[in-house]
Image (spheres, rainbow, N blue to C red):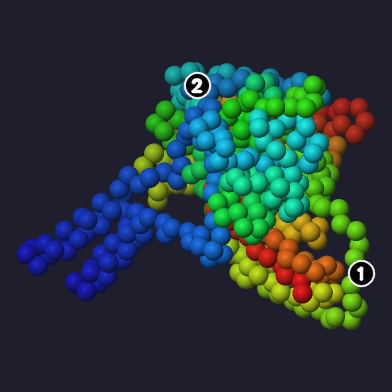
Amino acid sequence: MIRSFPLIIIFLVAAILLFLPAKKPFEVTSDMALSNLTKKFDIQDKDSSYGFVKYNDKIKKLLDNIPDDKLTPVACSDSFYRNVQGVYIFDNLRVGQVHFVRIKNEEFLEFMREKEGTFIGGKKILTGRICELADKTILLFYSVGIYDLELADTTTVRRAIAYSEDNTAYIDIIPRKSLLMKRTLKIAESENNIHCHSIFQLTNGRELFLLCEESKEWHSNYFVKKISLKNGKAQVLGSCLNEHRDKLKTICD
Amino acid sequence: MDKKLYLIVVLILVLGGLSVAPKAAIDLSKSGYQAASYTPLVLSNLLKKDKDKYVVIDVRTRVEYDAGHIPGAVWANYYDMEALKKAAGDKIPITYCAFSAMRGPYAAYLLYQAGFKNVGVLAGGISQWAEDLQGMDSNDPRFKTVFNHPKNIFPDRPKSEYPANRGEVEFNIVATRFKFEPNEIVVEHGQKVTLHIRSDDIVHGIAIPEFGIEEELPPHEEKDITFIADRRGTFPFVCNVICGKAHEHASMVGNLIVK
């Protein structure tokens, strides 16, 4: 026992160091303009501009059937995109109704730059959204892909992103404590543009219901997915495929 | 048994140490040039307190400037050394463009090379000023938004005569935060120049506006840029993708020297 004593002390110190509440890579700050904590997010079932159907009544019923007391409140930012200069800009937030709003949090920007440093094949962050739970766990939604820089130069970067290729949608789960437990879950992939930033609700059992949007030539497709934040298991609950080459044709299952 | 346990514990200690160790500071000093940067609020307060000491120079196009600019800012094109020097006069120049990604830092570096040792850039450019402070002057009565970034912002240079048969040269350049290595390229007038450039850490970019070059540099991928060095002179190059805090990003510069 006396011989093992120093070993026990060293082991305890090592254990404390490993599980010390390490600093999160970034904290949510006021410039991210998160909404209030919400249990159910209102997502329109149809695109207001083009009439694309996003989800049907079957999905609506499934979501409505989960009672409020089984849901965890979440606060989310507006969706954002990354421009060619590496600036992250919110889609809808405006100052003075005119000037767009960017994310200024340097730790967040640094986190995203370093993340991009791990991608291969010219992939970049395209779009995303930041959410936070009441226990300060951060859910970072983002899509990664490649777009034509010349197109971004001749139109807008948002249009170039809409025509991007080889997209993958992810969630980073950044818990309040311990850097070691940060996880990344792959939500969806597409040869074209896809993003999965629209959350319906999150259950107390950490099952996330969200809406993925995929755009490719003449098609705007929507998938409602259920993802377990505990084990990453994903399931498509329903999809609506909208073909708009000529007259709009929608098929939902 | 004890030896194995000690090894395991040492491994755990190392892992634990790595997880809490602070990141090494990034060395900005390699090029010997460090631009200062000012947030909109800091600059606004500085100008109220000491407006005779500083001059804010809008280095975007004239059209952009007329649409809306920082109150009191003067205008000079980002690549026009003589106009920039005249605009700076005997004051400390602070430059800005739309985001202070390329044109603002480029102009600041030109001024530094012209002898202005305390140059600065406005962090975030006029878009951040517009967002944080909103107040702007405009020569356009229909002024709505400053975000009117034109597509072609390179200097319009006429084609030059250059000697033929000067051969070809190639250079390897590595971009990391916050330097290009090497940051000085020397070539002969008339040579065909190929730059093999890659980023070793994050997404960078390189812009050599006098030769119409602007290229994004994704990490770990080599890009080849070829052009003819058809004019003599010293031509700066900068990183045109914001890769850090404003003063860090603006300090990532180099020179192409054509002899």
Residue B61 appears in view: yes
Query: In percent of the image, x 56 and y 60: which residue is there?
Result: B33
Which of the pair A114/B49 is nearer the observer?
Answer: B49
Q: In the structure shown, which secondary structural element does the residue marked by tag 1 occupy?
A: loop
Query: Which x, y percent locates residue B94?
Result: 61, 44
Amino acid of disc 2? Asn
Task: Classify residue B67 by image quadrant.
Answer: top right
Query: Which x, y percent locates residue A170?
Result: 59, 44
Query: In percent of the image, x 61 and y 20: which residue is there?
Result: A42
What residue is pinned by disc 2? A36
Which of the pair B223/A73 is nearer the observer?
Answer: B223
Residue B202 appears in view: no
Distance from disc 2 to disc 1, alpha carbons, whole Å, reads 64 Å
What residue is pinned by disc 1? B161
Q: Which mark is residue A26?
A: none
Query: Which x, y percent locates residue A25?
Result: 45, 45
Chain assignment, label 2? A
Query: In percent of the image, x 35 and y 57: which residue is there?
Result: B21
